[in-house]
Amino acid sequence: MTHAIPGYVCPDDGTRADARTAPWCCPVCSGPWDLDFTPDPATELTPSAGPNSLWRYGSALPLPGAFSVTLSEGNTPLVPLAERIHAKLDFLMPTGSFKDRGAVMLVELARRLGPERVIADSSGNAGTAVAAYCARAGLSCEIFVPEGTSAKKTDQMRAHGAAVRVVPGGREATAEAARAEADLPGVFYASHVYNPYFLHGTKTYAYEVWEGLGGRLPEALVVPVGNGTLLLGAALAVEELARRGVRPPALVAVQAAAVSPLAAAFEAGAEDADPVEQRPTLAEGIAIPAPPRARQILAAVRKSGGTFLTVSEEALRAAQRDLAGRGLFVEPTAAACWAAVGPAAPSDHLGGRTAVVPLCGTGLKAGLAP
């Protein structure tokens, strides 16, 4: 029921809004929303007794009551990849990427709110996920994508029944085009960046790591970062699990050297990131020159005692091929963490710590890097 839906709160100025009627961003500062929701740490977590989807963590999720949107997402394998490093195979999600975790939450929220149509902007994976879950929910959907987006990804969106609007320019131009329609009557903007329900879906990644490691977390969670949706979701889960007595890990964020505003800000000791040039990179999924949640991302990494790492185009190519040689074919973006901390990394950035890396997008969508 909509009256039980937690509302939004702006992390910068404290503005609050009802999720049923709120604009897509804070009306005071135009920043992204957080969610006015904190799970009760006294509530028992019994994921093994729940459905075979991320809804098995229902007591820690912000949409109470019966859910209807699901493709049995989540519960992906956690496998040894190297000494002290495990990989979580999120490329085995229903649409082929970890974005299903957030998309199912956004679309379940949209279903409860009953819009005339759903829109989203994406460089590929988030768009395919939103399109698939909208199809599952019977919602009309339009995805805005930048020119040059993989034809395999746009084909997938269209196959799910979504309209695809190709926007000239890069990722930022695409986001601006979607936001221009986000407040039109009857529109739900399924923004994986501005809408915090997405983060409460991606946090299930860390909950599953905790479950897969027998009730503990590794010493480091290594995460690719563009808009930071996986990292911020993991940070939410780490905080929530810490309230249950689970020792928190360091968050190690990885960016492509070609587009690395957050890594540069972290190195400079800055609280926010300056926009950088949109340069070409194989890791298109994290090529975000001006991430709206930059301040939150930098703060989360620093609070955890973590760091930022960058990887070259050559390292991305080599890591994708190395993973394929181990039986795991992922897109170049998903190989970024392995490039940063795997055996071929220029130094041991983990310092011997145990770690988990996400393999978060299938190579079948992008092919082998040239």
Image (spheres, rainbow, N blue to C red):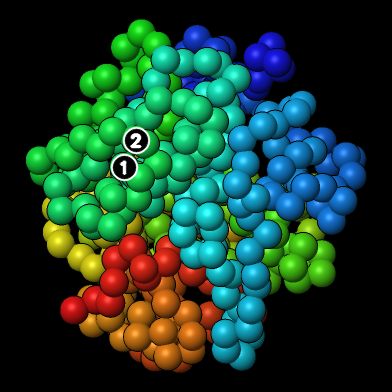
**Residue 112 visible somewhere in the drawing:** yes
Position in image of residue 217 (x %, y %): 71, 66
Q: Nearer the viewer, residue 173 or 305?
A: 173
Alpha carbon distance from label 2 to label 1: 5 Å
* Residue labelled with disc 2: 162
Report the side of 297 relative to 73 (left or right): left
What secondary structure is marked by label 2?
Answer: loop
Q: Residue at x 49, y 85 (%)?
A: 327
Position in image of residue 293 (x %, y %): 40, 40
What secondary structure is marked by label 1?
Answer: helix
Q: Nearer the viewer, residue 235 or 191?
A: 191
Q: Residue at x 60, y 20 (%)?
A: 112
* Residue labelled with disc 1: 158
Q: Are marks 2 and 1 in contact (CB under 8 Å)?
A: yes
Please, which residue is most extreme toward the left here?
Answer: 168
Report the side of 53 relative to 264 (left or right): right
Near mark 1 (Cα within 10 A), the count class, few <14, some 14-19 or many ≥20, is some
Quadrant of the image for the N terminus? top right
Report the side of 133 relative to 238 (left or right): left
Q: Amino acid at mark 1?
A: Arg
**Residue 32 visible somewhere in the drawing:** no
Report the side of 257 relative to 159 (left or right): left
Q: Residue at x 52, y 15 (%)?
A: 114
Near mark 2 (Cα within 10 A), the count class, few <14, some 14-19 or many ≥20, is many
Q: Nearer the viewer, residue 163 or 214?
A: 163
Q: Amino acid at mark 2?
A: Ala
Q: Using the image, determine if residue 64 lies above or below residue 365.
A: above
Q: Residue at x 28, y 33 (%)?
A: 163
Position in image of residue 48 (x %, y %): 84, 56
